[in-house]
């Protein structure tokens, strides 16, 4: 029985990117090396690497692929243009997660600084990507410590999609409190909606929890309200792809319905996310761009049609949960009522 | 472009049962002949034939298979025992739908009457099964007429699972108002949640609507709340597997979450069902037995695992929507507020 928390990303020896191809889980644990910006963009677009924080890290590591990875090149005009072009390509992969743009902006600025200073560009970009990764790992740990205080011993919790180790550079966001409690032998049982259409719940969350030795139960998305009615779920914890200034939260499609069911049964509904997920430039949830994905994700599975040929499909990847349905937002900088989340960047010591 | 409403059941020339195997839709339109009680029981258990009203009809036709189908036998002791045994086997196939037990009880009583009267048992049972079928067809038509008055012209409606022609002996229950309006060229657009785990929404409802020429859009079950929030859905109409005396309704898993989302957005929530679905012996929803189905339905698809091996699964086939979330129950005997549905059998002229 393996009991380790899996890691979805790593550097290859010469600073290519080695990813766990998440589209093949849970039946196949297969790793793939990415050595060009286009390969990284394809992996993000195809959800081989996914999860808002991890997309930011992968994109940052992807920018490194735009320049010589030996790290010795100076940051000339051509190299800076290559970095800018890489940022453009990578930013266009997915529209909803704010971490992606945030990480790419850091990489772009670091490249310009390297040019000003005459530093070796590759080394500077590798260091910046590592900093983004390490900060994410630390944020996950902090979210885990804070969130763990909200979960009673022996509890059952419910999550949605995958906001675990496979979605971040560390122990996850929504699952970080679960793993933190697991270290002291007090992991809650986790109810995992399968999360159609791409089944990140059953394929990924159930897989990483099983790898880590945490007990879980998979349910269909339509079973959520009935499961919450049973009365034994202490709280819901989900991740976030973007948090608007008013506390509205974009997360995997299905989260909003889960929040309505939690409200109907008086169950606390927590969002766990690194502070980089907050987007003060977006005043409320109605302004968050929602990625619409291909009809085939809903209309077929494993190459077999699940809906008649030619039928219309609506397939948004995310939904918006209004702030009033959220009990609290757990960040690396403290636990906030959603209405006060816009004070987050100014309140680093709020915890 | 075909525009006919498909029929899921028929007699073969010598009164075997020809069913459309609903497990193979939408990729294959395949018919299967059933000529023994065990074959009918297997088809019901495996959902080759499904939908509360259709299960009742199929079971009634299944009882015919227990006796000589030429119809000339007299109802002796052996034949009556064979009918009773068939009713027992067929009643045990699925626990939630009340129509199944109701139809079998009619067949059992008809067999006893045939014995008393010295009638040819097979002919009597065929006639009774045909009566159950024809009554269901008429009930569907009446539900369609009544329900059509609740749907504005040009509306979009949302359903769940399949409560259409494939679930009944006629034009369906929840979809009957849709087809009734379709006849006058005023069919609403239908939003169809796929209805995991067995995808009766995308595989069956979208297929029969497409066959009939009614426009529809398939969504994932987790998309329901977001879709209802868009503001263009006039009402929700679902079927029922059992209606308790207090108006609580058991229907396909996911219905309760849909009802919560409808309430949150002020959208009328209608249940459409033949009066035979009402079970006065069940005081409220908590007493309705909920069928738990095999874990493999959630943990795999088309033979490929969708969850890691050995993971726990919770897979109830139905949930209970409390009466207070239901705007009205549309029956063949009138439209009732759920709290008054127990008056239904006494108020045949309520409409």
Image (spheres, coloured by chain):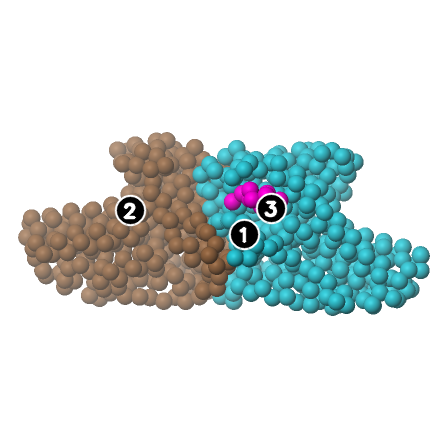
Chain colours: A brown, B cyan
Front residue of this view, candidates A350 and B155: B155
Q: CA distance from mark 2 to mark 3?
A: 52 Å
The tag on residue B183 is 3
The disc label shown at residue B213, or none: 1
SS category of the residue bearing label 2? helix
Q: Residue at x 30, y 36 (%)?
A: A282
Residue B218 is covered by the magenta coloring: no
Measuring from the top left, give residue A269's x and y in whole percent: 45, 39
**Cβ–Cβ below 8 Å for labels 2 and 3?**
no
* Disc 1 to disc 3, C-alpha distance: 11 Å
Whole-Å distance between the Cαs marked 1 and 2?
44 Å
Q: Residue at x 93, y 56 (%)?
A: B116
- Up/down of B141 relative to A33, above or below: above
Front residue of A176 and B59: B59
- Range covered by the magenta-colored residues: B178-189
Q: Which mark is residue A99?
A: 2
Say whether residue B181 is magenta.
Answer: yes
Crowd tier of the residue under label 2, counting other residues whose Cα lies within 10 Å: few below 14, some 14–19, many 20 or above: many
Do callouts 2 and 3 point to residues on the same chain?
no
Q: Residue at x 47, y 46 (%)?
A: B223
The spot of residue B250 in percent (x, y) is 65, 45
Residues marked 1 and 3, same chain: yes
Say which label, 1 or 3, has the lower sequence index. Answer: 3
- Answer with the quarter of the image where residue A41 lies: bottom left
- Judged left or right of residue A183, residue A125 is left
Can residue B1 be seen here? The reply is yes
């Amino acid at each position: 029985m393996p009991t380790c928390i899996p890691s979805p990303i790593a550097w290859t020896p010469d600073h290519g990117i080695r990813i766990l191809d998440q589209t093949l889980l849970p039946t196949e644990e297969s790793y793939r090396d990415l050595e060009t910006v286009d390969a990284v963009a394809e992996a993000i677009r195809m959800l081989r690497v996914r999860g808002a924080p991890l997309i930011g890290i992968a994109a940052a590591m992807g920018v490194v692929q735009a320049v010589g990875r030996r790290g010795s090149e100076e940051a000339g005009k051509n190299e800076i243009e290559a970095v800018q072009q890489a940022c453009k390509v990578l930013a266009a992969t997915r529209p909803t997660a704010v971490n992606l743009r945030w990480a790419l902006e850091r990489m772009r600025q670091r490249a310009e600084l390297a040019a000003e200073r005459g530093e070796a560009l590759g080394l500077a970009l590798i260091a910046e990507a590592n900093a983004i990764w390490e900060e994410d790992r630390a944020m996950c740990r902090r979210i885990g410590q804070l969130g763990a205080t909200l979960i009673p011993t022996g509890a059952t919790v419910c999550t949605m999609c995958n906001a675990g180790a496979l979605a971040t550079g560390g122990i996850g966001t929504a699952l970080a409190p679960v793993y933190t409690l697991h270290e002291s032998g007090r992991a809650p049982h986790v109810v995992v909606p399968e999360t159609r259409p791409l089944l990140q719940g059953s394929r990924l969350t159930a897989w990483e929890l099983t790898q880590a030795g945490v007990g879980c139960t998979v349910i269909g998305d339509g079973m959520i309200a009935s499961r919450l009615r049973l009365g034994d779920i202490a709280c819901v914890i989900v991740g976030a792809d973007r948090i608007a200034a008013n506390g509205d939260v974009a997360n995997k499609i299905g989260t909003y319905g889960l929040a309505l069911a939690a409200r109907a049964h008086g169950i606390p509904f927590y969002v766990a996310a690194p502070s980089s997920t907050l987007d003060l430039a977006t005043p409320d949830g109605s302004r968050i761009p929602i990625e619409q994905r291909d009809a085939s994700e809903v209309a077929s599975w494993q190459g077999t049609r699940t809906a008649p040929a030619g039928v219309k499909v609506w397939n948004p990847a995310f939904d918006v949960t209004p702030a009033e349905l959220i009990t609290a937002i757990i960040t690396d900088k403290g636990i906030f009522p959603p209405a006060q989340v816009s004070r987050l960047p100014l309140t680093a010591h709020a915890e």
